[in-house]
Image (cartoon, helix red, strand yellow):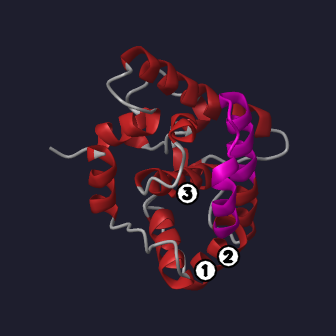
Amino acid sequence: MLFKNDYLAAVGVTQATYTGNQLAAKRICEIYNSARRGKISHVLGSELWTSFFAPLIPQFSELPATQAHYDSFATNQMLQLASLLRQRQKGDFGLAHKMLNLFLKDHWALSTLTPHSETLLHLPLDHNLLSKLVTIPPPWATWTKVVVTHSTQEHVVGSYLEIQSKFRIFWQRIAPRFASPIEMDQFIWHRI
């Protein structure tokens, strides 16, 4: 619970954050802005909240139960979000993965996901986390600029899942120190 509380305090998320459209749209803007690639308007944040993020919440109780199925679910969601961002010239897969994973990290910290689902979550990749890897797959060296096209989608998604797998294997080696990979991620970010 320490890591969840630490995260909630650091980002300012509360149980009320996702109960109303205004606060939820504001948080979606903050998540986007955390990538330091510019800002999105409250109007776009509201649009993304309504069309993409809000419909995910009812699915939380029925998230896939295996890692392979969750990986497929998550990457499909990222591809959908990447398409929305691309249409608005606000990014692509690199930003989409970060937004989805931070949104899910918010819900991890709010304890709205089952403990089993928490263990399946992907880490929100960024420079700090990627710097822990001995080798970073080429498209991910500058993660905010990762783009998916018809011809690169398989490689980009595959390299993304390869990175997630490396962190998951490391987590399994040091478990039970952390209850989930996302808790390990929060430890990496924990300020002392």
Q: In the displayed image of the protein, which residue is found farthest to the right?
A: 150
SS for dot 2: helix
Residue 109 percent coordinates (x, y): 41, 53
SS for dot 3: helix
Q: CA distance from mark 3 to mark 2?
A: 15 Å
SS for dot 1: helix
Foreground residue, 179 or 145?
179
Vertical placement of residue 8 versus 51, above or below: above
**Residue at image mark 2:** 50
Residue at 72% from the left image edge and 52% from the top image edge: 77
Q: Quadrant of residue 186?
A: top left
Residue 31 percent coordinates (x, y): 48, 63
Magenta span contains residue 109: no
Whether residues under marks 1 and 2 lie with C-beta atoms below 8 angstroms apart, the answer is yes
Q: CA distance from mark 1 to mark 2?
A: 6 Å
Residue at 68% from the left image edge and 38% from the top image edge: 70
Instruction: Name which residue type carries label 1.
Output: Ser
Vertical placement of residue 76 versus 36, above or below: above
Magenta span contains residue 59: yes
Stretch in magenta: 54-79
Instruction: Name which residue type carries label 2.
Output: Thr
Q: Is residue 39 visible?
A: no
Going from the N terminus, do you reach mark 3 or mark 2 first? 2
**Residue at image mark 1:** 46
Instruction: Name the side, left or right, on which 178 lies relative to 75.
Output: left
**Residue at image mark 3:** 99
Vertical placement of residue 94 versus 23, above or below: above
